[in-house]
Amino acid sequence: MTVAPVIALDVMGGDGGPAVTIAAAEIARTRHPEIRFRLYGREDAIRAELAKAPLVARDAVVVHTDGEILGTDKPSQVLRRARQSSMGLAVDAVKAGEAHAAVSAGNTGALMAIAKLGLRTMPGIDRPALAALLPTAKNDSVMLDLGANAECDSENLVQFAVMGAAFARTVLGLATPRVALLNIGEEDLKGTDELKHAAALLRSADLPMQFAGFVEGDKIGRGDVDVIVSDGFSGNIALKTAEGTARLVVELLTRAFKSSIFSMFGFFMSRGALRSLRSHLDPNAHNGAVFLGLNGLVVKSHGGATAQGFANAIRVAHDLVVDDIAHRIREDLDNFQAHRTAPPAVQAAQ
Amino acid sequence: MTVAPVIALDVMGGDGGPAVTIAAAEIARTRHPEIRFRLYGREDAIRAELAKAPLVARDAVVVHTDGEILGTDKPSQVLRRARQSSMGLAVDAVKAGEAHAAVSAGNTGALMAIAKLGLRTMPGIDRPALAALLPTAKNDSVMLDLGANAECDSENLVQFAVMGAAFARTVLGLATPRVALLNIGEEDLKGTDELKHAAALLRSADLPMQFAGFVEGDKIGRGDVDVIVSDGFSGNIALKTAEGTARLVVELLTRAFKSSIFSMFGFFMSRGALRSLRSHLDPNAHNGAVFLGLNGLVVKSHGGATAQGFANAIRVAHDLVVDDIAHRIREDLDNFQAHRTAPPAVQAAQ
């Protein structure tokens, strides 16, 4: 790609607001000097922060709006407010071709609704999926769908697999990522009919991935597969359970360390090691969930992200734009459909 | 209950076999001297272990069988072999009224199939559920269904809630446990229609529980609710993801401790604290998953349980028998059905 990637930022979204998002943009500019920003939000607040961000200030386009989507907004309010909000305008910029991707740390449900309605799904994709990186014992894994669709059929799951593999190739730099379907057992007989059918389709497809069958929840953290595919209900449950459990273990650990003077001393001696554990699990290090399958890229940052964390979300957007992930997905889907001559039931029986 | 609780043990099931199961029975006898055992498995192996278990040996009934369900058996083989297997005979003893409960550390799928077919569901229950205890930051929580039914409707979920609350009253000793449905958001609008309908039914029901609405995956570990209800697919995914994540964090921690001489020394100083963390998360301490809703009690132990762990599973069986959980469930269900005069849709709209 020869044009500079243009990123539309929802400056107001997230707990930190403009102070975090503009500082993050400045970090991103030092990493990728070719990025250009379009900034959506309250102009006075943006200008105040730009004073501390000379690289961004040099060529950023500032688009003023008073509107903002709040975490407390009801779904009906979200879509009514979208047009005037910083989030809605950032997504609109992608739709209008003024930006290659939008990044927001605002409410996930609102962003999903605005992105779906504004950008619609790309040809060959019936439903978009929310994908993100998870820390594992080895490298990071990609997981999707994390909550865009509560119920999915086998075609949706196959499309998620194609999109997840393309995402892993770009963000993890893997040539043929290992892809598995999340299930309640590894045997072929386990799970719903949708899962069995999706497995049969993926097994017989010729795609730039290694299909590894089913994976169970307890194997996610081992990092044996690179892409974990599921419907949005189970994926959301798995992601949040993993987050909650990691927090629980760290909390129990901290409590255990405080239980005696010996262990407090031990804690003091080990604090470097514990810092490295915390940073391995730090959501900021894995920040940047992506809505895949839309006519345009939208990246969701954690609401509580730091400037470094939000800059990581911008990096994800940058990499996906530079790698032209939409093109990769379209190519793989076309290839999959072209080689799918026999009806799936027959293919599965071969 | 005035009769002594009789427990049928699948002596051969689990990684440790008779050495673990009989040693566990001996521990259980010291805890609950009134328990009587029926032991199913290879008589020579059982007799050899009974020599080390004088309390159990005194009055245990030994029933010899060569048959055994293996972890590698296919579902079709399981049911064919069930009749002659130690697992099948233990469940049959419950069916025949010779024992109040069966305990096995054998293959979960096989035990589920044998128990469902042998005992059938109790009146008012359409599907059984697998329930177990989870460690949290506060007290343990009950979670169900953990994999007995991949897909569930709202009636199933309500029945699971009733059974889970009865289980929590017995095993956790709570008068009115807080019960919540596992969902991908806490707002009323989130999730599948089955979940929304189940929530409406539970909200309007007069049951010995506090219905707390929806709970998300990241809140499971906080222990804010006592009973977490879900379909068997999401429940299994959540349980296994929690197990896998806890293992991952402990592994990363161990790795971090070994990263420098300082942190190794710190580890040495803190090992008491770390032991207490491990024991809080130890599956043996939370051992004993229960198939609820059948005409008879069946308890599943972890396959890799120690004698102490298997003894904990026997304790769960003992407590549920003494508390007559089947009676509690029946009473609550009758009460729920009796007060359900209006059709659910109208109740929900009130």
Image (spheres, coloured by chain):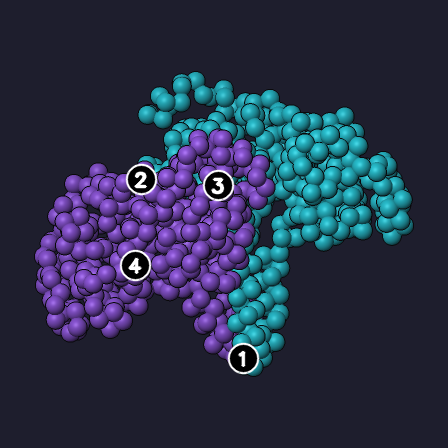
Chain colours: A cyan, B purple
Marked residue chain, label 2: B
Q: Tell me the distance, in whole angstroms, between the alpha carbons under discs 4 and 1.
A: 39 Å
* Mark drawn on residue B323: 4
Name which of mark 3 and mark 2 comes first in the sequence: 2
Q: Position of residue A276 (x, y in %)?
A: 60, 63
Q: Which circle's residue, 2 or 4, is located before the other in the chain?
A: 2
Marks 2/1 in contact by CB < 8 Å: the verdict is: no
> In 3D space, how far apart are the residues under numbered discs 4 and 3 (Cα atoms)?
27 Å
N-term-proximal mark, 4 vs 3: 3
Residues under numbered marks 4 and 1 in contact, where contact means CB atoms less than 8 Å apart = no
Residue A260 marker: 1
Q: Which residue is mark 3?
A: B204
Give x and y (percent) for residue A321. Answer: 69, 35
Position of B136 with respect to B58 (left or right) is right
Which chain hosts label 3?
A: B
Question: Please, what secondary structure does the residue beneath circle 3 have?
Answer: helix
Is A107 situated above or below A122? below
Q: Chain of mark 4?
A: B
**Amino acid type of disc 1?**
Ser
Chain that bears disc 1 = A
